[in-house]
């Protein structure tokens, strides 16, 4: 049995893939798939809470997703507003903190205002955190961290020889959030898609062919069980873990 056999991941990050294919299989518009996917988010939030997972990061909208058809992007932004409206009471009831990572400046101002309002309203909660990656790019996050450090060097606030992994990580979007223990990708695609490139260095990966709108508790449990069978060595030999 692995050293993780009795453990629950502290942080799960999910690449929610397959909404479009789910809709296509049913002869529905792609936006219907995204609507079904939003319902899955509500379920997974509850699965994580019941299992004791403290951090859940969802890849909700990548910086590359802006290239999708304008009507689809508009629908996704509308769904985001609905998600906040429909779930804010649950955040308060369960003391869940909402956070956003990504380029907020890409989002329309009304959405940013609403996101930041809910962030402020839930900022003191400690029972769990839901982190939405919006207009997010893993490479973009690394670039902004490098720029922030370069600006500190320019101002004389940081010496280049003081920059190490700890200093670099402190300039990421959410430096206080632990790296994901488990990254789940639905729909069977075998790629990371520019997601949490720094943070995933030692994450365990679990890929399921299940499309995101169909991902339910048995699928979530299967991901947890797979994680618990892993031996996380972090580059060391097994008897030194």
Image (cartoon, helix red, strand yellow):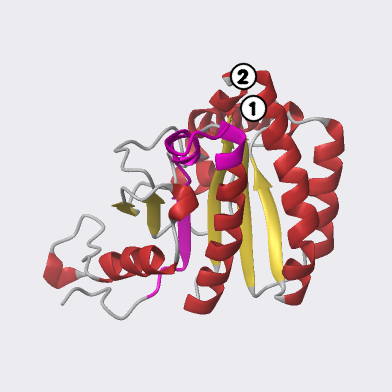
Residue 220: x %, y % from top left: 40, 65
Find residue 35 and report its horizontal and vertical position in percent: 62, 45
Q: Which label is found at residue 69?
A: 2
- As helix, strand or loop, the secondary structure at mark 2 comes to loop
In the depicted structure, whether residue 52 falls above or below residue 216: below
**Could you say whether the residue bearing mark 1 is in a helix, strand or loop?**
helix
Proximity of marks 2 and 1: CB atoms separated by less than 8 Å: yes
Check the picture and name the quadrant holding the N terminus.
bottom left
Q: Residue at x 46, y 68 (%)?
A: 10
- Residues rendered magenta in the picture: 8-33
In the foreground, 220 or 173: 220
Tell me if mark 2 has few (under 14), some (14-19) or many (20+) residues whose alpha carbon lies within 10 angstroms of its own. few
Q: Residues within 10 Å of mark 1 (few under 14, many from 20)?
A: some
Task: Please check the rendered image and state whether residue 26 is part of the magenta-colored stretch, yes or no.
Answer: yes
Q: Position of residue 62 (x, y in %)?
A: 56, 32
User: For this rendering, which residue is in front, 112 or 236?
Assistant: 112
């Amino acid at each position: 049995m692995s050293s993780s056999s009795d453990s629950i991941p502290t942080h799960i990050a999910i690449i929610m893939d397959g909404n479009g294919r789910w809709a296509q299989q049913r002869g529905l518009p792609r936006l219907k798939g995204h609507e079904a996917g939003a319902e899955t988010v509500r379920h997974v939030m509850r699965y994580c809470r019941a299992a004791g997972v403290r951090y859940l990061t969802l890849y909700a909208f990548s910086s590359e997703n802006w290239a999708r058809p304008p009507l689809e992007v508009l629908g996704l932004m509308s769904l985001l507003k609905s998600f906040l409206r429909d779930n804010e009471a649950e955040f308060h009831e369960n003391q869940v903190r909402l956070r956003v990572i990504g380029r907020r400046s890409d989002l329309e101002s009304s959405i940013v205002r609403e996101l930041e309002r809910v962030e402020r309203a839930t900022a003191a909660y400690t029972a769990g955190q839901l982190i939405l990656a919006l207009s997010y790019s893993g490479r973009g996050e690394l670039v902004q961290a490098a720029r922030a450090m370069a600006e500190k060097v320019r101002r004389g606030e940081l010496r280049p020889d003081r920059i190490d992994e700890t200093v670099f990580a402190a300039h990421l979007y959410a430096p206080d959030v632990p790296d994901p223990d488990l990254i789940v990708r639905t729909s069977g695609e075998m790629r990371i898609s520019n997601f949490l490139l720094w943070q995933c260095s030692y994450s365990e990966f679990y890929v399921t062919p299940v499309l995101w709108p169909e991902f339910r508790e048995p699928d979530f449990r299967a991901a947890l069980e797979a994680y618990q069978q892993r031996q996380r060595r972090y580059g060391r030999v097994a008897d030194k873990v």
